[in-house]
Amino acid sequence: MVDKKKGKQKKRPWRFLLAGSVLLLVTVGIASLGAQKSLVQPLAVEEGGLRFQVETGSNLSRVLRQLQSEGVVKWPRLVLLYAYWQDKTGIHAGEYLLPKGTNAMDLVDRLHRGDVTRYRLTLVEGWTARQALDQIRAGRNVVQTDAGGSTESALEALGLDAPSLEGWIFPDTYIYRSGTTDIELLKQAHERMRRVLEDEWEQRSDALPFDTPEEALILASLVEKETGQPSERDEIAGVFVRRLQRGMRLQTDPTVIYGLGEDFDGDLRRSHLRQATPYNTYVINGLPPTPIALPGREAIRAALNPKDGDSLYFVAKGNGYHHFSSTLAEHNRAVREYQLKRRADYRSSPGKEN
């Protein structure tokens, strides 16, 4: 009898252990289902989505606490455990937009991928460096720095060995993240100009009247300012190149206007053409000391590959195009026809054709 009781007593712990294991599995299962439900349940994001900023140097735990304080994430520790389990704790700085319906797993994925909001910024051909710098600093969520406050300080920040920042920024559309600094964008545009100029210089024509890419950039800026008509760029460049080869002054109005700076009131007068400035090509010989604007790739290519011909003069016709002449007499006739008798619909740049 004693042995049987002892035998029964030996079996009872196994029954308790089995029952406990089942209870543990059930509890873990319920907790797992609850956790999974919490991870897939949409976050508290309203219509229009939620924008928030992840600062440089922040981590996932800090971001989740921030979103918890805003009532977006309910269980930040659970989300953090999920991120560790998926090996996705690394995140990227920037501005994020969470659309309505985003769940915790989506949030972790977005932060880990760096799926940040990106902005577009366009620098236009023919702008000055000051205009380009102002546009960069005015970009949405661009961080302004002291170095970007002037073209002189920006020139120093770039480490550019040039007398001016003018012409050394490539006009294009740039994509950037929130928190990008003005100098970072400026460096990107400057490096792009260097690459473009280097590529085009390697494909230049022979016997050009200048020896350096910097001089080509100056000529390209004159071409850019003289015409917005793509079909005329190489012909305009041809006129300038032939005048340089013959020792003739370039006599291009945009250099006069640039040299006048803030004194120019929009009305170019004969007295301005005689006013001595380092840029006035009616007064100086050869090229001006620096570019006068941001030239695009097409203007650079035209300056390095000018069109052959014998034209030495051109005058705006008033419809966005120019009349080219090979003699002064022909040019004077064109000036009388197109400039002295201007039509009511005169314009210096091309418009949309019907």
Image: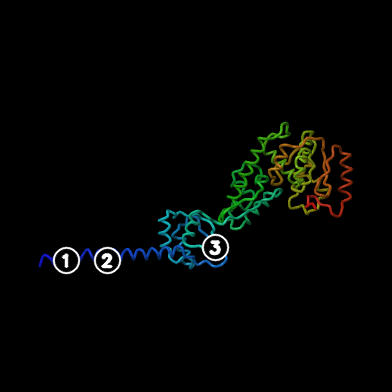
Q: CA distance from mark 1 to mark 3?
A: 63 Å
Neighbourhood count class around disc 2 (C-alpha, 10 Å): few under 14, some 14–19, many 20 upward = few
- Between disc 3 and disc 2, the foreground one is 2
Disc 1 residue type (three-letter): Lys
Name which of mark 1 and mark 3 comes first in the sequence: 1
Residue 165 drawn above or below residue 138: above
Q: Secondary structure at mark 1?
A: helix
- Residue 314 in the figure: left or right of residue 105: right
Tell me whether circle 3 and circle 2 mark residues in contact (CB < 8 Å). no
Scheme of colours in the image: rainbow
Q: Nearer the viewer, residue 332 or 23?
A: 23
Give the number of the disc on residue 99: 3
User: In 3D space, how far apart are the residues under numbered discs 1 and 2 (Cα atoms)?
Assistant: 17 Å
- Quarter of the rendering containing residue 22: bottom left
Mark 2 lies on residue:
19
Q: Considering the numbered disc 2 on the image, is that residue within a helix, a strand or a loop?
A: helix
